[in-house]
Image (spheres, rainbow, N blue to C red):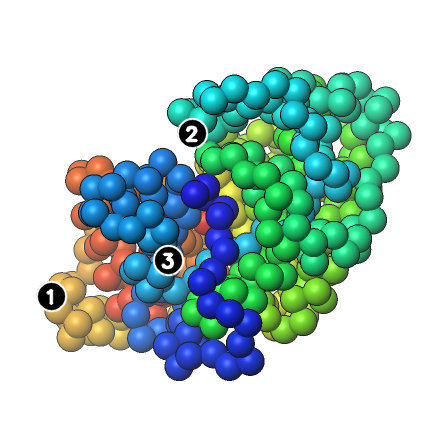
Amino acid sequence: MSMFDTVGTSQASTARKPSTLRKVARMNQALRHEQPDRVPISDFFWGGFTRRWRQELGLPADANPYYHYDLDWIVTLPNMDPWIRPFTTLSETQEEVVVKTGFGAVMHKHFDFPMPEMRSWDTDTFEKLEQARFDDPRDPRRFFSGGDNQLAGVGDGFERNSPPWLDTVKSLWPDFAVYGSMIEVSECLTRLVGQGNALLWMGEEPERMGAVINRIGAHLLACAEAEIAAADGRLDGFVIWGDVAYKQSLLFSPTYWREYFKPWVTRIAAHAHAHGLPVIYHGCGNVRTIFQDCARPAPPARPRHRVLRQQRRAGLGDGRPRRHPAGGAAQAQRREGRRLHLHVRPLGEQRRLGRHLRLHREARARGRPVSAAPCRI
């Protein structure tokens, strides 16, 4: 099982369980900054973790954390490969495999290691990138056919012939809040040409690279539109995958991101919103310089004395103002207030877990629900 092995156990159904409807309502309320019945809970589970989890708890070989813990929501992946084609196997042993994917990337996957190695790319010059033309974003194979695709197949696990995306959605729909997803341009470039090439070409030819970003952005927007249409009302939300930062700062200038990357994130989000779908924008790394770009207009803030009184009634304090620890998601949430909804990953280190749990309690008291999930914006 890999992180994105998300096939459900239910047969296609025309009705959802009452508990599933509560999960959908819970997610929607949390993402609208309303008070749900409880904090929504989910996660992404590495394949290595799932194997150990089954072994250490003595669970069956097909045990699934989403079902075992009755989690609230789950994310699905259509075929986002620029060129829809089977993997080409370049070498394979019992310990490892080397394949070429639909991104034109040669990837080495050692089965004992958590992540693959990108070795080379067919699109290895800027001129090739400018001339590249992708398969139709509305190609039915992206949504209705099984087959190889890089994001679902080559990651912390390795899988050939992933099931049809729509079948996956249908199998999960009776039991979970089901989210579709799409990469944005930075994620696409990393897989298509490599992180080093992408950053180098942005620096050498910023305007020409900007034109490429706009062309890829239009393709991914069309993919997202086709995905939502293919789901035919079976999605409850949408995730945009967008790793754009190092540990300390963005991969590139915030100004460059705002000019070329942000418009396509905005348009994908707007299309999802137009179909009634809440959007989660995933971003690993330190993205504090673009927090304001991700924040919506703030709802009216409640007077401070009312917040403190509610805290006191909830048993979270004595009703007096307190200084809060600086740093991380807690600082960002307090700085941006109700405009920014953070999903904070409950970290395993004991010295940090307590702080995040306090953040959850305080957020609920203030009417700012925080979902227990991996780091997301």
Q: Earlier in the sequence, mark 2 or mark 3?
A: 3
Q: Earlier in the sequence, mark 1 or mark 2?
A: 2
Q: Quadrant of residue 304?
A: bottom left
Vertical placement of 111 versus 55: above or below? above
Query: What residue is shown at x 59% (from left), y 46% (from top)?
Result: 162
Asked whether, in this view, residue 100 is left or right of residue 16, the answer is: right
Q: Which residue is mark 2?
A: 114
Q: For the residues labelled 3 and 1, say whether their Cβ atoms are less than 8 Å apart.
A: no
Q: Is residue 169 visible?
A: yes
Between the C-alphas of marks 1 and 2, the distance is 46 Å
Q: Nearer the viewer, residue 53 or 206?
A: 53
Query: What residue is shown at x 47% (from left), y 60% (from top)?
Result: 8
Q: Earlier in the sequence, mark 3 or mark 1?
A: 3
Task: Check disc 1 and give the amino acid type.
Answer: Asp
Asked whether, in this view, residue 310 is left or right of residue 284, the answer is: left
Query: What residue is shown at x 58% (from left), y 29% (from top)?
Result: 251
Residue at the extreme right of the image, as rendered = 131
Badge 2 marks a residue whose secondary structure is loop
Q: Is residue 238 visible?
A: no
Residue count near mark 3 (Cα–Cα under 10 Å), binned few <14, some 14–19, many ≥20: many
Q: Which residue is mark 3?
A: 66
Q: Quadrant of residue 365?
A: bottom left
Q: How many marks overall?
A: 3
Given this view, does label 3 or label 1 mark the residue nearer the observer?
Answer: 3
Where does the image place residue 361, in percent across and percent down from the top left? 23, 61
Q: Which residue is mark 1?
A: 318
Between the C-alphas of marks 3 and 1, the distance is 38 Å
Badge 1 marks a residue whose secondary structure is loop
Query: What residue is shown at x 51% (from left), y 81% (from top)?
Result: 15
* Quadrant (top left, top right, bottom left, bottom right) of the N terminus: top left
Q: Nearer the viewer, residue 277 or 171?
A: 171
